[in-house]
Amino acid sequence: MCRGRNNLLFFMLIVSLFFLAACGSRDQGTATANSDGVTSNEGLHTTIVGGRTGGAWSVFTEGIAESIRRENEGSIVTVEPGGIVENPVSVSSSKTPYGLSYAMTAYAAYSGNEPYDRAFPNIRAISVVIPANYYQLLASDPGMKYESLDEIVENHAPIRLAVDQEGSAGEIITRTILKEYGVTYKDIQSWGGSVDHLSGSKTFELMADNRIDATGDAVSVPSGDIVKAASLNDLKFLSINRDVIRAVSEKLGMQAGVIKSGSYSFQKHGVHTLYTPAILIVNNDVPKEQVYQVTKAIYQNLDYLRTVHNEFENLTDKNIAEVGKVPLHPGAKKFFKEVGLLD
């Protein structure tokens, strides 16, 4: 009697362990090895944190998620709302395995620079998502008589400057550029000017009312907000000293570039500035084989991504691996080497 009961308990224990093991396998994804010895994560269950609900970044993130689903049958990839500054912290601390951020913001988190109060060293890069968000310093025309930031600084012009919220990517870039000129917000105020933290749409409303002279932010080209503002305001770009561009690019983990002439109706010449791509980041502890498959999925679905949002039209095999200063995850590095995009 006891022996039969013990056998029954033993049988139930074995069944329970088998059930738990099966559940664990579903959570991590079903792994099968291909001829190269690389694990394919069919049935991958994971999460990507993107931007605010309804914004362009939520569309970008869903496009990446669907690319992964298309290449890994049975995968469940959840997209959650997030923010450019918050996402690197979430990824490094393992709250979410994957996320989107600017390359400059991810590098600031990785290295412990502003706006972060400490380093988050577990961040790794996978690929570029949106190749370039250009810093665009704009002024009302002809309300602003100066053509460059150099002239404004040299003349201590009392400009009314609008910047994004403190600690945002665009605000940090603006403040760092001014610092490279030896200027602070307080200096601008001492010249009789002002510095206001405003959203893009509010800024252009006030610019139309002649209450703001200039504004700077890192956005796509062409930016919908700027295109709309240009239909209501006369705008022009303010040029930035190229030595300043190079110095700030190095400090913030950005790149120097040019906004091509004709990108906007009011733009007649190319504008030298700096830019940062939006990249997909991952926690360093995510398995190499899984990240390899995620990288491969993005690369093999570039045509699909271009149907998701026009920003993806600029993503090519020539820039997909140019993630900035954040180290590539070994899985991404392996894939890019295999397809000849890395030495």
Image (cartoon, grey):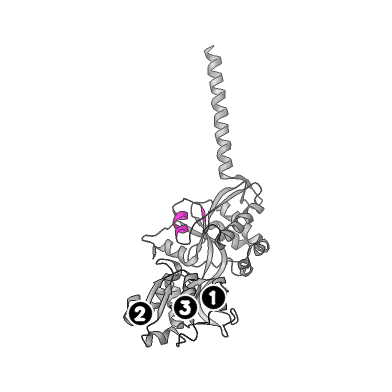
Looking at the image, tell me whether mark 2 or mark 3 is earlier in sequence order.
2
- The amino acid type of the residue labelled 2 equals Ile
Give the alpha-carbon distance from disc 2 to disc 3, as whole Å.
Answer: 21 Å
Image quadrant containing the N terminus: top right
Would you say the residues marked 2 and 1 are in contact, meaning their CB atoms lie under 8 Å apart?
Answer: no
x and y percent of residue 298 in the render? 62, 59
Give SS at disc 3: loop
288, above or below 340, in the image: above
Q: Please state which of residues 55 and 83 is positioned toward the viewer in this rendering.
A: 55
Looking at the image, tell me whether mark 2 or mark 1 is earlier in sequence order.
2
At label 1, counting other C-alpha atoms closer than 10 Å, the crowd grade (few under 14, some 14-19, many 20 or more) is some
7, above or below 322, in the image: above
Q: Residue furthest top?
A: 1
Looking at the image, tell me whether mark 3 or mark 1 is earlier in sequence order.
3
From the image, tell me which residue sits under label 2. Answer: 188
Q: Is residue 74 left or right of residue 210?
A: right
Q: Would residue 276 be visible to someone looking at this image?
A: yes
The mark lying in front, picked from 3 and 1, is: 3
- The amino acid type of the residue labelled 3 equals Asp
Give SS at disc 2: helix
From the image, tell me which residue sits under label 3. Answer: 209
| Magenta-colored span | 85-98
From the image, tell me which residue sits under label 1. Answer: 229
Magenta stretch holds residue 218 = no
x and y percent of residue 51 in the render? 52, 59
Q: Please state which of residues 291 and 204 is positioned toward the viewer in this rendering.
A: 204
Q: Residue at x 48, y 81 (%)?
A: 139
Would you say the residues marked 3 and 1 are in contact, meaning their CB atoms lie under 8 Å apart?
Answer: no
